[in-house]
Image: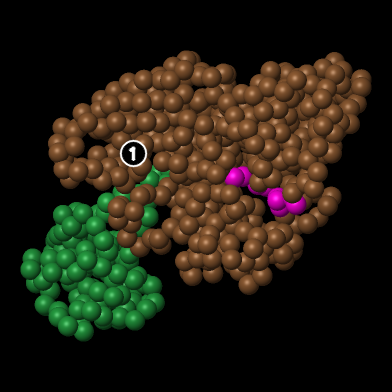
């Protein structure tokens, strides 16, 4: 999923929450439902402060692209700026728990020049 | 897996201390390290179609480790080591005749010990015949005239990894195929000498490879074909490959090569062909093995209650063998020369086309002539690239009956036969 698609999905979710006539109720989420690992609680808390963590778990991104995504969330969506160990712990978790997904059913083809 | 035997039983000659392919992968050991232990053994890892060094690897995937087996190219892709299975990445199918070093490996059971004396290897022809034969390889060569044909040998499951959802079995890309010079005795000459009875309907093939479990009562594989197909003049009892004595790993001293149909009919370490008065029901003949559904299935379903028919001719297929997937060309490169191979089971190839725009436009490739029936066509094409950038190259073959390769694997079936989606590679210019 591209950053643009991710942004669109985020806006949809945020938008849905703001419309009172929307029937779909926010699903209860808990950190335990997602892959165990160091930094899970911090990551869950940071991301789900604004949007469902399910949206995060649906992504598969490299550490660099998670870093870009965090920057985007700060610059465009008002997430508090995270730096140093705070940022590293979350990035480590995101990169480990939600890495890029291999394409299947492609006869073995993977885009060979994908940025690291 | 229901296997209970220990590794030493399953794969003879395995050096002690290297008993897990995972160890090999983690340690990053290649052939040289194994070679120090004397006999080589497969050290395989999960890796799909490989790419040259300059290509960056997809994030989150392990670096493919070298394939380690005596006499085999380190660039083969190991799909399993018990049984031993390895495929040839498309860029290693770039030779007109596939060298033994690059030829794919498909075993169903254990690899037998190499024969001490090739010439005394014994073949029996029995069952529905007037004159059963028991011939040594030497007698076979003395009594019948050998011929040599260059022919494609292709695993029935080739292309399986194109199915979505994944189908069960080895996840071949397009590399469960190769084209070698096979020297052997025409099977039909031997069957004529054995005087096949009119009651004979089907062959049943048996080999010397022990079952993975070590159970001597079980066949690793025992497939067969209708007598009409058995009489095809290109079926050979093969004892030499590319002019060399048939290597043990490819079924030597003696194997069948039955071109155009699934490779499982080309029985390795062949000891017996029994003529039967009915369709053979050996290992690999029943259930969903080597069979396609007679009506389209919902992908992922079990196929219960649906009739299945035996897979006969393999489907049409083209691969681009040069450049390799992941090749990077210098900025400004505009002429793109492509090379490849195409084959089509029993049905001849009519044309091969390539596309750099996902199939919006196609350019026809030039086909080299065949040496003989069941040979593959080598093909070449030159494309002009409009600019620097990233290009995906698709190749498709069409047979003389008009059947062309689909963009995706179609006719999903539980064990994934007939997958012949267009081959896809990517290059980067600049």
In the image: residue A64, left or right of residue B203: left
Q: Is residue B125 left or right of residue B238?
A: right
> Residue B325's spot in the image, x, y percent?
35, 43
Q: Position of residue A75 (x, y in %)?
A: 7, 68
> Who's the residue at 21% across and 63% down the image?
A65
> Can I make out residue B274 in this image?
no
Q: Colour of chain B?
A: brown
Q: Position of residue B84 (x, y in %)?
A: 62, 52
Label 1 crowd bin: few (<14), some (14–19), many (20+), radius 10 Å: many
Q: Quadrant of the N terminus of chain B?
A: bottom right
> Which structural element holds mark 1?
loop
Q: Which residues are magenta?
A: B105-113
Identify the residue at the far right of this view. Answer: B131
User: Is residue B312 rendered to the left or right of residue A25?
Assistant: right
Q: Which sits in the foreground, B362 or B8?
A: B8
- Give the colouring mode of the picture: by chain
Q: Main secondary structure of the magenta part?
A: loop
**In the figure, B249 relative to A53: above or below?**
above
Q: Is residue B298 magenta?
A: no
Q: In which image quadrant can residue A71 be found? A: bottom left
Q: Residue at x 67, y 28 (%)?
A: B183
Where, by quadrant of the figure, is residue A90 drawn? bottom left
Residue B315 pos. (x, y %) = 52, 28
Name the residue carrying label 1: B323
Is residue A41 in view from this perspective?
Answer: yes
Check the rendered structure and report the hue given to chain A.
green
At x 22%, y 73%, the residue is: A47
Q: Give the quarter of the figure containing the C terminus of chain B.
A: top left
Tell me which residue sits at (27%, 51%) in the image: A113
Q: Residue furthest bottom?
A: A85
**Does residue B42 sit above or below B153 in this rendering?**
below
């Amino acid at each position: 999923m591209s950053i643009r698609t991710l942004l669109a999905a985020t806006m949809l979710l945020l938008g849905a929450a703001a419309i009172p006539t929307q029937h779909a109720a926010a699903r209860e989420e808990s950190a335990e439902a997602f892959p165990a690992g160091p930094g899970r609680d911090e990551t869950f808390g940071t991301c789900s402060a604004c949007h469902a963590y399910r949206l995060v778990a649906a992504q598969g991104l490299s550490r660099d692209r998670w870093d870009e995504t965090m920057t985007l969330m700060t610059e465009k969506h008002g997430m508090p700026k995270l730096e140093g160990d705070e940022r590293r712990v979350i990035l480590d978790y995101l990169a480990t728990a939600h890495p890029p997904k291999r394409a299947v059913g492609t006869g073995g083809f993977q885009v060979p020049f994908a940025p690291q | 897996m229901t296997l209970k035997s220990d590794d030493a039983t399953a794969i003879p000659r395995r050096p002690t201390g290297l008993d897990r392919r995972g160890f090999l992968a983690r340690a990053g050991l290649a052939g040289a390290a194994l070679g120090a232990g004397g006999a080589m053994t497969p050290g395989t890892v999960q890796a799909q179609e490989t790419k040259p060094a300059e290509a960056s690897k997809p994030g989150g995937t392990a670096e493919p480790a070298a394939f380690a087996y005596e006499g085999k190219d380190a660039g083969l892709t190991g799909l399993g080591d018990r049984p031993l299975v390895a495929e040839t990445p498309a860029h290693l199918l770039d030779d007109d005749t596939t060298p033994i070093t690059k030829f794919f490996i498909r075993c169903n059971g254990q690899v037998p010990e190499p024969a001490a004396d090739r010439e005394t290897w014994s073949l029996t022809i029995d069952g529905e015949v007037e004159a059963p034969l028991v011939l040594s390889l030497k007698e076979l060569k003395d009594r019948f005239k050998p011929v040599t044909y260059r022919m494609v040998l292709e695993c029935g499951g080739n292309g399986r990894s194109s199915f979505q959802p994944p189908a069960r079995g080895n996840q071949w890309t397009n590399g469960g195929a190769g084209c070698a010079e096979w020297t052997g005795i025409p099977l039909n000459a031997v069957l004529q000498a054995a005087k096949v009875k009119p009651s004979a309907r089907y062959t049943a093939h048996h080999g010397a490879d022990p079952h993975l479990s070590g159970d001597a009562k079980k066949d690793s594989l025992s497939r067969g074909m209708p007598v009409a197909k058995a009489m095809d003049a290109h079926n050979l009892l093969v004892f030499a490959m590319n002019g060399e004595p048939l290597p043990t790993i490819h079924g030597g001293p003696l194997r069948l090569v039955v071109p155009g149909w699934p490779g499982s009919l080309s029985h390795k370490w062949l000891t017996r062909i029994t003529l039967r008065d009915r369709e053979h029901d050996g290992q690999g003949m029943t259930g969903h093995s080597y069979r396609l559904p007679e009506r389209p299935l919902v992908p992922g379903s079990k196929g219960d209650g649906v009739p299945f028919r035996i897979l006969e001719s393999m489907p049409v297929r083209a691969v681009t063998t040069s450049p390799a997937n992941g090749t990077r060309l210098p900025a400004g490169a505009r002429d793109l020369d492509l090379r490849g191979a195409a084959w089509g089971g029993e049905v001849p190839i009519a044309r091969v086309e390539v596309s750099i725009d996902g199939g919006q436009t196609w350019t026809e490739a030039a086909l080299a002539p065949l040496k003989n029936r069941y040979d593959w066509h080598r093909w070449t094409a030159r494309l002009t690239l409009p600019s620097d950038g990233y290009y995906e190259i698709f190749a498709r073959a069409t047979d003389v009956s008009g059947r062309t390769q689909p963009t995706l694997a179609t006719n999903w079936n539980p064990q994934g036969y007939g997958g012949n989606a267009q081959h896809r590679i990517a290059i980067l210019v600049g």
